[in-house]
Amino acid sequence: MSANPIQVRDLHKYFGELEVLRGIDFEVAAGEVVCVIGPSGSGKSTLLRCVNRLEEPTSGTILIEGEDITDPEANIDQLRAKIGMVFQQFNLFPHLNVLRNLTIAQRKVLGRSDDEANQVAAAMLERVGLSDKIDEFPARLSGGQQQRVAIARALCMNPDMMLFDEPTSALDPELIGEVLDVMRTLADEGMTMMVVTHEMGFAHNVADRVVFMDGGVIVEDGPPDQVLGNPQHERTRKFLRAVAQAEE
Amino acid sequence: MVATTRAARPWWKRVGLGRLAMYVVLVLIVLLFVFFADFEKIQRNFFDWETIERMFPDVITIAAKNTVIATVLTFAIGLVLALLLALMKRSTIGPYRWFASGYIELFRGLPALITLILVAFGLPIAFGWDIPGGRLGQGVIGLSLVAAAYMAETIRAGIEAVPRGQMEAARSLGMSRANAMAFIILPQAFRIIIPPLTNEFVLLIKDTSLFFVIGTTPASRELTKFARDFMTDARNATPLTVVAVLYLLITLPLTAMVRRLERSASRGKR
Ligand SMILES: Nc1ncnc2c1ncn2[C@@H]1O[C@H](COP(=O)(O)OP(=O)(O)OP(=O)(O)O)[C@@H](O)[C@H]1O
Ligand SMILES: [Mg+2]
């Protein structure tokens, strides 16, 4: 039996009195690409951040490759190293150059030697097409380049899965394409991916499944053609109409 | 509109009556000083060449050296203590936080003089042992205890000025809290607080003059104590002038550096 690498069961999350996640059940299969869409404040980021425990779930279980990460005994650092995360604001380390951004966690977490870490870093930079930027500092890169470096940094840890929280939302329109291309290649190579995004084109073409969230629950979950093309719920239709209008 | 009327107005209106009055007062003060000051007396009391000659080389080889050594040691020890306190204050463990808060409030609330006296005279009485390094050592320890309290708050502010996403990115890569703090957060925090820390250093240079309260041996005198001793001896105020110049020689370049750092920091933000 090979269980799905991400399993979320009856997940609840409160911020004080506010219940942001109100019973989430869902799974991601190995190699599957799931796009999470939904209006602002619906809990998409919170769900994603619970999956690598940047947020502490209030109740429920989250199994990563069969291990319960909500268990206080779990080695959260080892688990997190298996889960790559890419943020809306890139969050590169501004005091380190690109190479050191890519090697620091390899050395501190995986215990790799300098040589090995440098080799992996060079290989991952090549994957995102930025080999020539290896000595630059983040501030000297465009937003799109920074986000590609951030993806490479996550890949350096050889993660089994990747989480993306609106990876293109902070980018100028002309820079979105280069980041989506890198993500598409990753998806084609069989990476397990959870992507919170407003890029409906990407969701349509790349995702295996689209999840629509609203008000802290999953309203609709299915193949992109169905959820985006023929939504069953009025809330989904309303959201998609609003997105289509905003894009005009 | 202002521009068109400006040229037409007479000069005393352009300058403004308030400013004009201030210039008049300034000129009067300077004239009074020039007419009534006894330059010979001033020279004898503040710029007596013979006294200056007698102060050298000891004022450099003993006094200035002690001031610089004491300041550097105080700063170094204070910084290490401050870092510990700042990390304790952010700890998830309550007692650590309480201790750090208590410490910071206590030593910021007490006059530095009291702390110095406590360390030099109170500790030996209470525990029966002396802090090594003689009077200078006791002064250094006493002052570092005080400096740590101030610098801890500076460091904490620096840590808090680093965006939250930095810690999250480090943790999401699997780094432990301690590693993330040491390699990601603190290097950025210290970059932010270099100007206030340099300011603290300048304050410490001047604070070492408080060491006189715990008494000193001839070899452990810093600049201020040295000047006071020399004044009694020379019966004029020239030693004060000399050490004042020496203090400024040390502090002015540092404050100029702080200004440059602050300017380049604010440029970097834009
Ligand atoms: N740390 C926090 N403390 C308190 N409330 C929070 C916190 N983080 C998120 N929230 C609240 O939880 C709700 C869901 O936030 P979340 O960021 O998960 O939404 P989202 O779907 O990602 O929205 P967006 O599209 O704007 O990113 C919002 O109402 C938000 O204000
Ligand atoms: Mg969000």
Image: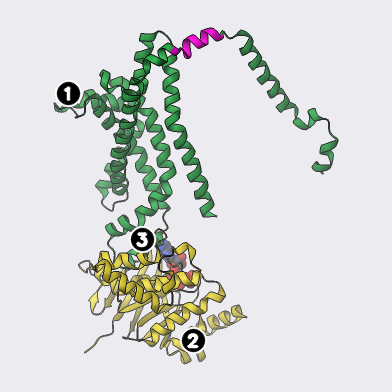
Residue B124 at x, y percent in the picture: 17, 25
Q: Quadrant of the C terminus of chain A?
A: bottom right
Residue range in magenta is B39-49
Q: Would residue A190 appear left or right of B253 to someone viewing this image? A: left
Q: Which of marks 2 and 1 is in front?
A: 1
The residue indicated by pointer 2 is: A233
The residue indicated by pointer 3 is: B167
Disc 1 sits on a residue from what chain?
B
Residue B98 at x, y percent in the picture: 28, 44
The span from disc 2 to disc 1 (Cα, nearest Å) is: 80 Å
Q: In which quarter of the image is residue A220?
A: bottom left
**Colour of chain B in the image:** green
- Please, what secondary structure does the residue beneath circle 2 have? loop
Q: Which residue is drawn at 31% across and 34% down?
A: B74
Q: Quadrant of the N terminus of chain A?
A: bottom left
Q: What residue type is labelled 3?
A: Met
- Please, what secondary structure does the residue beneath circle 1 have? helix
Residue A157 at x, y percent in the picture: 30, 73
The span from disc 2 to disc 3 (Cα, nearest Å) is: 39 Å
The residue indicated by pointer 1 is: B125
- Residue neighbourhood size for the residue with mark 3, other residues' Cα within 10 Å, grouped as few (<14), some (14–19), many (≥20): some
Q: Are marks 2 and 3 on the same chain?
A: no
Ligand 1 shown in quarter: bottom left
In contact (CB < 8 Å): disc 2 and disc 1: no
Q: Nearer the viewer, mark 2 or mark 3?
A: 3
Disc 3 sits on a residue from what chain?
B
In this picture, is B38 found above or below B71?
A: above
Q: Is residue B88 magenta?
A: no
